[in-house]
């Protein structure tokens, strides 16, 4: 009796893993097709758009750039200068010092000639207390507002920025990111173009700045990172931005806009209550909540994505830091999906509830768990002697080349669209990374994500610290 | 006792049978032994191999087991003989004893018994297979091992495996194809860049020569062939060269003014590049159409207006936008009335593009903005209101004022912003009414506007409104305007209200660093 039940469970599990595996393949192939179509359209469009038209237009919306900073003293001044030199006529930069323990505030006051003001704002969203708001005496920095507040985390700092901002759109960025000079005007395009739907948020393409040459706050020479982990993240970012987000944008199902660079409709952000400060996945959570609100109100809306790499960020190249980052990302995803679980397979939420949300639950949140169970299932079959080596090898190689194929698509898309990595040997390095990734990096990623699940269940939280080499190092290298 | 009786009875029965049914058959010891070797077993007949001791046979400690007798029962004679022979070979004195129904018999009795058995077939013969098995095994041992199923047949006989391998093959092929494409694209892009660089160099020299060393008249008098030969007869047939030349001319045209623009246009026309641009308008691909429109727009080819006009209602957003922009740019009369009938909603992107064309137009009297304000399309009306503001059309303030009561919310907001931008003092009464509008957005805009166009009455109304509302932004706007109109009243009202956030707003308004925040 027990043996029969056990056999039945084994059979069902086997069929489940097989179907899951093929579902993954089909879904990602569809994503590749949709992203290809969307990317082609965007690139064609770009040929006929003169972004210089947007820079001085009186018709365009105002943008408040919100950049929370925590212990970023090392690179803060350079990054703020870079933000202030963005090409657009109607924007303000709000730097929120989130109770840094270093001398960030002193550095800002000294370098930008800041003075404390009596800035009055409506604290629509509850936040940690604001100590002071500064403005510069120097007219060159008239667009700069610096907020000094008690530490409350990134989401809390952004909420303070939202309360203070005075423009129609808010751009939430990581202060350590390097933005392309025309990043604002390019990100505004979806907001300005759409007529039938309200564009509630726009995400932008992000590139990896490790090992690149930076001059005057701009990336002037692109190179792939030196380490395997760094290069792997280049491929991962290509896959994520040029395949995943492009495809989801095409079908208007995008649930995630990177916290490093995203534009939002301020009115709607205030309506939904701003960022959720207790979440470590605040970026995804906000987009899901905004979508949820629009679906509940039955209002036509769109979450768009601009594929151009407009923001460059430093990624961790040490396993320790990367593991913490991935752990946090996984916890953030689980938190968001748990918080809004009523949307899952709920036709009331349209495409978001029926397609995007289930995709995230099945293929992003649960993928590491299913992968682990698959590995245990294989071990069990080996132990029972009910195992076909031929099938195992066949399926293993199939998945390996599927992964390699997807990565190569993303590299091809990058090559066709932007062609940033032109250094001799860069392409070869990327291809070797594609071949190594499934064997040497993917298992580690899965382990870190499973640890994220475990930490979520045990209630172990926190952000972990991102140790930055600082872009200055790269400038020295250039010299 | 009973069992013994039965055995004897059966034995007697056999004897009777032997004599009555088959008759007597002569037998000897050799025939009997041969028979016994051939058969598997004979009914009721058993053999015991016995030896006085078994040390050698067991291979154990000889001294310890020296006294143990060996005895083993067999039903097959061959097996018994095999064991006996092996014992003898090991130096043990072994012999076979014969038993019928467990009674020991001498060999003579056995011969007789066997003869009866043979006559009545009371034995189990050795099967042919058993006989052959040994031969097969021996033969098989001489042949090298080869598996019955090889890997190839194992794979191709399993449809699931074939499916997996086919998909794997597809992925592998696609992966390799992708790598191939990546390298091809990279090398093609590099080559293309190098060729474009070369073509640019070829184009730039004659272009500068023509622009700086020839007059407009000299260029106008040139023939197609003459001008073409100054560039490159050889390359002129190549599409990439033509496209590079067009782009070069357009780039230079963007950065130059006056006479140079005329010269460039003349070169463009003489080289028949305008024909190419116009031909692009007929294409079914939107990107080709757009590229043709952009080229004609940049080069000021006004005689293409007719063909561009056909595209102003194109389903494609980019084509539509560029066509309207080009039409506005190329037509002498900047009459916007054609836009009033457009069905598609006008995006802010399009508004921006059209405004860019119109903003430098000195003769904006003939634009017919009123037609936009009367359009059935709300987004066109909004654009019309924006144009009134951006182009400073003071004479249309009254029109805006008239349409205010029936306008939609976005239009009302734009009208109030326009009144502020044009400092429409005459509209103060209308703004006073709007200040008390239940819509906070309109009310906030009106409050701000009153700071610029308001009067004494406005200050009183602002104070009245301040006591009615509970919205931070509206309070801030009202107080800011009140401060601008009457500072004393402002201070008095703040004190009278005696609220913390009102004091904060007051401090904000009075902070010189926050003047424009």
Image (cartoon, rainbow, N blue to C red):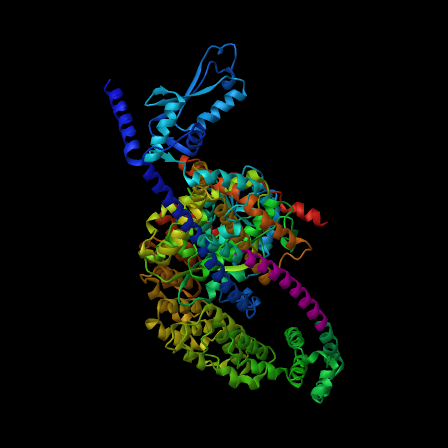
Q: Nearer the viewer, residue A452 or B360?
A: A452
* Residue at 41% from the left image edge and 39% from the top image edge: B127
* Residue at 34% from the left image edge and 56% from the top image edge: A349
Q: Is residue A420 visible?
A: yes
Residue B72: quadrant of the picture: top left
Which residues are the magenta region? B171-199
Q: Nearer the viewer, residue B61 or B53?
A: B53
Q: Quadrant of the N terminus of chain B?
A: top left
Whether residue B336 appears in magenta in the rendering, the answer is no
Position of B428 with respect to A214 (left or right) is left
Please tell me how many numbered marks the rendered image carries. 0
Location of residue B369 with respect to A248 vertically, above or below: below
Rendering coords of residue A165 (x, y %): 46, 53
Location of residue B16 with respect to B252 vertically, above or below: above
* Residue reaching furthest to the left: B2
* Residue at 48% from the left image edge and 47% from the top image edge: A391
Q: Is residue A181 visible?
A: no
Rendering coords of residue A26 (x, y %): 44, 56
Rendering coords of residue B415 (x, y %): 40, 69
Residue A51: quadrant of the picture: bottom right
Position of A429 with respect to A163 (left or right) is right
Q: Nearer the viewer, residue B29 or A452?
A: B29
Residue A409: quadrant of the picture: bottom right
Location of residue B481 with respect to B332 vertically, above or below: above
Rendering coords of residue B38 (x, y %): 43, 34
Query: Magenta part mainly helix, strand or loop?
Result: helix
């Amino acid at each position: 009796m027990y043996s029969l039940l056990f056999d039945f469970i084994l059979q069902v599990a086997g069929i489940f893993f097989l179907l899951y595996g093929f579902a993954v393949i089909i879904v990602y192939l569809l994503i590749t097709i949709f992203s290809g179509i969307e990317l082609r359209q965007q690139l064609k469009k770009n040929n006929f758009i003169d972004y210089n038209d947007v820079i001085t237009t009186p018709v365009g919306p105002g943008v408040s750039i919100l950049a929370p900073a925590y212990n970023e003293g090392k690179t803060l001044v350079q990054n703020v200068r870079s933000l202030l030199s963005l090409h657009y006529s109607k924007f303000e930069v709000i730097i929120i010092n989130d109770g840094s323990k270093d001398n960030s505030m002193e550095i800002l006051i000294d370098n930008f000639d800041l003075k404390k003001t009596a800035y009055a704002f409506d604290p629509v969203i509850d936040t940690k207390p604001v100590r002071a708001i500064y403005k510069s005496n120097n007219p060159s920095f008239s667009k700069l507002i610096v907020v000094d507040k008690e530490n409350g985390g990134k989401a809390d700092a952004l909420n303070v920025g939202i309360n203070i901002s005075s423009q129609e759109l808010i751009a939430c960025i990581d202060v350590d990111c390097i933005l392309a000079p025309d990043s604002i005007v390019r990100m505004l395009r979806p907001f300005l173009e759409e007529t039938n739907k309200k564009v509630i948020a726009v995400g932008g393409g992000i590139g990896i700045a490790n090992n690149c040459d930076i001059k005057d706050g701009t990336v002037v020479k692109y190179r792939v990172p030196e380490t395997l982990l760094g290069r792997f993240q280049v491929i991962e970012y290509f896959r994520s931005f040029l395949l995943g987000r492009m495809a989801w944008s095409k079908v208007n199902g995008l649930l995630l806009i990177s916290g490093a660079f995203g534009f939002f409709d301020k009115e709607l952000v205030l309506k939904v209550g701003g960022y959720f400060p207790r979440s470590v996945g605040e970026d995804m959570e906000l987009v899901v909540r905004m979508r949820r609100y629009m679906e509940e109100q039955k209002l036509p809306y769109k979450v768009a994505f601009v594929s151009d790499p407009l923001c460059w960020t430093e990624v961790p190249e040490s396993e320790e830091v990367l593991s913490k980052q991935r752990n946090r990302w996984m916890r953030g995803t689980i938190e968001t999906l748990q918080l809004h679980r009523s949307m899952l397979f709920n036709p009331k939420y349209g495409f978001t509830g029926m397609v995007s949300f289930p995709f995230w639950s099945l293929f992003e949140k649960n993928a590491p768990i299913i992968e682990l169970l698959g590995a245990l299932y294989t071990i069990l079959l080996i132990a029972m002697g009910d195992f076909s080596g031929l099938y195992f090898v066949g399926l293993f190689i199939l998945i390996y080349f599927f992964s390699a194929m997807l990565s190569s698509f993303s590299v091809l898309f990058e090559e066709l669209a932007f062609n940033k990595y032109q250094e001799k040997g860069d392409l070869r390095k990327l291809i070797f990374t594609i071949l190594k990734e499934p064997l040497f990096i993917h298992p580690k990623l899965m382990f870190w994500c499973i640890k994220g699940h475990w930490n979520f269940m045990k209630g172990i939280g926190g952000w972990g610290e991102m140790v930055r080499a600082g872009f200055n190092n790269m400038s020295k290298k250039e010299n | 006792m009973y069992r013994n009786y039965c055995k004897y009875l059966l034995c007697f029965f056999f004897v009777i049978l032997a004599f009555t049914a088959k008759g007597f058959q002569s037998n000897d010891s050799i025939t009997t032994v041969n028979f016994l070797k051939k058969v598997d077993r004979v009914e009721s007949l058993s053999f015991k191999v016995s030896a006085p001791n078994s040390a050698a046979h067991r291979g154990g400690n000889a001294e310890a087991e020296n006294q143990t007798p060996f005895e083993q029962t067999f039903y097959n004679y061959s097996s018994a003989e095999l064991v006996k022979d092996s014992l003898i070979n090991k130096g043990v004195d072994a012999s076979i004893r014969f038993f019928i129904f467990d009674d020991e018999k001498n060999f003579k009795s056995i011969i007789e018994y066997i003869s009866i058995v043979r006559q009545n077939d009371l034995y189990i013969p050795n099967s042919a297979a058993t006989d052959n098995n040994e031969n097969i095994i021996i033969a098989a041992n001489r042949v090298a091992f080869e598996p019955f199923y090889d890997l190839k047949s194992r794979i191709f006989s399993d449809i699931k495996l074939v499916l997996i391998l086919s998909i794997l093959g597809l992925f592998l092929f696609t992966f390799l194809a992708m790598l191939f494409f990546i390298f091809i694209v990279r090398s093609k892009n590099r080559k293309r860049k190098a060729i474009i660089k070369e073509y640019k160099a070829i184009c730039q020299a004659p272009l500068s020569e023509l622009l700086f060393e020839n007059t407009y008249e000299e260029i106008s008098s040139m023939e197609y062939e003459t001008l073409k030969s100054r560039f490159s007869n050889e390359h002129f047939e190549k599409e990439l060269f033509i496209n590079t030349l067009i782009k070069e001319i357009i780039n230079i045209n963007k950065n130059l003014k006056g006479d140079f623009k005329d010269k460039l246009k003349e070169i463009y026309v003489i080289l028949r590049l305008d024909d190419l641009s116009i031909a692009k308008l007929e294409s079914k691909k939107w990107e080709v159409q757009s590229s043709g429109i952009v080229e004609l727009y940049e080069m000021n080819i006004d005689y293409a207006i007719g063909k561009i006009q056909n595209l102003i209602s194109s389903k494609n957003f980019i084509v539509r936008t560029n066509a309207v922009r080009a039409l506005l740019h190329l037509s002498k009369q900047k009459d916007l009335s054609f836009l009033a009938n457009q069905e598609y909603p006008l995006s802010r992107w399009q508004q921006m593009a059209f405004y860019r064309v119109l903003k430098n137009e000195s003769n904006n009297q003939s634009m017919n903005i009123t037609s936009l304000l009367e359009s059935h399309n709300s987004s066109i009306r909004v654009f019309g209101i924006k144009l009134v503001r951006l182009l400073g059309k003071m004479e249309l303030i009254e029109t805006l004022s008239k349409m205010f009561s029936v306008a939609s919310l976005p239009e009302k907001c734009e009208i109030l912003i326009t009144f502020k931008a044009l400092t429409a003092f005459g509209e103060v009464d209308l703004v006073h009414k709007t200040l008390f509008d239940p819509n906070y957005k309109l009310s906030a805009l009106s409050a701000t506007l009153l700071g610029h166009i308001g009067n004494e009455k406005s200050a009183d109304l602002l104070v009245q409104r301040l006591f009615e509302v509970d919205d931070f932004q509206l309070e801030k706007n009202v107080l800011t305007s009140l401060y601008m109109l009457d500072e004393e009243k402002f201070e008095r009202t703040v004190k009278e209200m005696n609220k913390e956030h009102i004091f904060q707003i007051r401090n904000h308004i009075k902070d010189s660093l926050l003047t424009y925040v």
